[in-house]
Amino acid sequence: MPKLKFGAFLAPHHPIGENPTLQLQSDLEFVSLLDRLGYDEFWCGEHHSTGWEVIASPELFLAAAAERTSRIRLGTGVISLPYHHPFMVAQRIVQLDHQSRGRFMFGSGPGALPSDAHTIGVDPMLLRDRQDEAMTVIRRLLNGEERFSYKCDWFEVNDAKLQLLPVQDSLEFTVASMVSPSGMTLAGKHAAGVLSIGSMSTAGIQSLPLQWSFAEESASKHNQIVNRENWRLVLSWHIAETRQLAREEAREGLMRHNNEYTVGTLAAGQGTLFRTPDEAVDATAFSDTSTSVIGTPDDLVKRIRELFELTGGFGTVIGFVHDWANSRATTQKSWDLVARYVIPEVNGMLEGYRESNRYVIENRDTWNRAGMAIQTKIMENKRAAAALSEGGEGELALSPHALAGTTSTDTND
């Protein structure tokens, strides 16, 4: 399996109750943590309702994150294009790429929440077509085309050209994909990467084996090329040293997330309400249709390898950031464990260590002969031989400090 990148996606999903100002600061501190731990990417979304998803401008958030980080790449996951004039989106993209010194990734979507579209008076049936239309214009602007005009039923540009282009020669486009083929088809048309958010659902997992084929078919139709390295799978996890500890840490928050947000808010009460925290954990991570991992680093490694086999390959594992854990510190520890144990295991970073360890163990006879040669040399030294008879032969022979004190000239005594 090729090396995978790892990142995080912050919608965010925060239970109502905490000071919003402090929560935003906590989210920015989390990005800094990911940067220090060596994660490759961070994405955040755009939402305007529900009370749980509180970042209204991913561009503003990422500008602050850029000042707190040095290496992690920063992406909009996503900008809801039907809500914005494409020229203004392109302008903000360019500014962010410069402020982050070329670390920006442009992710777009049609808008995830019907309540957002309703508030600003956009017909939900028009959202996907408008995303497509906006992407076409934004691509032309970022490519530095000569001035052009474009007019449609919801925006127009006249003699449009950007006065400043991005730092990156080829700034990455990415689209969000749920379960239907539409996201993948759009990615193929625009030669874009994919952020598969649908992989967190049972239906999404079941659709994964066919998903990339939709992107490839669309790319072929539009004379484009898509690359599996730009396919990102979003997964939910909570990791601890043992499965039991992971269960205890995640159970209450997971139940609250499902009952109050997934069912209570998004589905207006329609769906499965968990009666106990243990039932929530069992259904989410330990049933035949589970899509999340609540357990140890080894459990997550196994899951990632299974999904790689199921899909035929992808480029990046994206962890969905949530508040299942019983404390902020526990959430941070989960991501720390993934960085320390999951990433190196998945990417084969420990194979050299393991081979060296096996080599030393399997060639014990060689090292024993070397030890005997050293001990023979010591016995040629009168003072060393006397010390051996007084302090114990094995003790001196194995002592690096004693060996360091014996030089070649001592053998002449």
Image: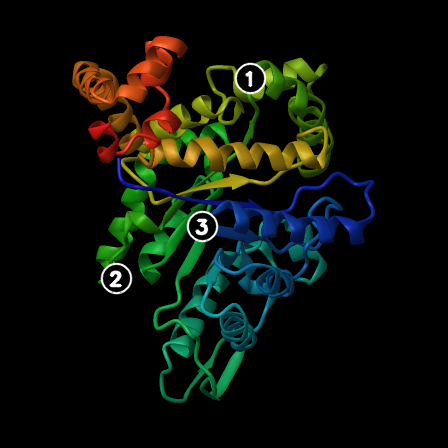
The circle on residue 242 is 1
Mark 1 vs mark 2, foreground winner is 1
Which colour scheme appears in the figure? rainbow
The kind of secondary structure element at disc 3 is: loop
Other residues around mark 3 within 10 Å, as few (<14) / some (14–19) / many (≥20) = some
- Asked where in the image residue 99 lies, by quadrant, the reply is bottom right
Give the mark, 1 or 2, whose residue is nearer the N terminus: 2
- Which residue is denoted by mark 3 in the rendering? 40
151 or 413: which is nearer to us?
A: 413
Other residues around mark 1 within 10 Å, as few (<14) / some (14–19) / many (≥20) = some
Image location (x, y in percent) of residue 170: 35, 69
Image location (x, y in percent) of residue 22: 78, 50
The residues bearing labels 1 and 2 have C-alpha atoms spaced at a distance of 49 Å
On screen, residue 337 versus residue 19, left or right, reads left
Q: Residue at x 44, y 72 (%)?
A: 138
- Which residue is denoted by mark 2 in the rendering? 222
Rendered view: 227 above or below 286: below
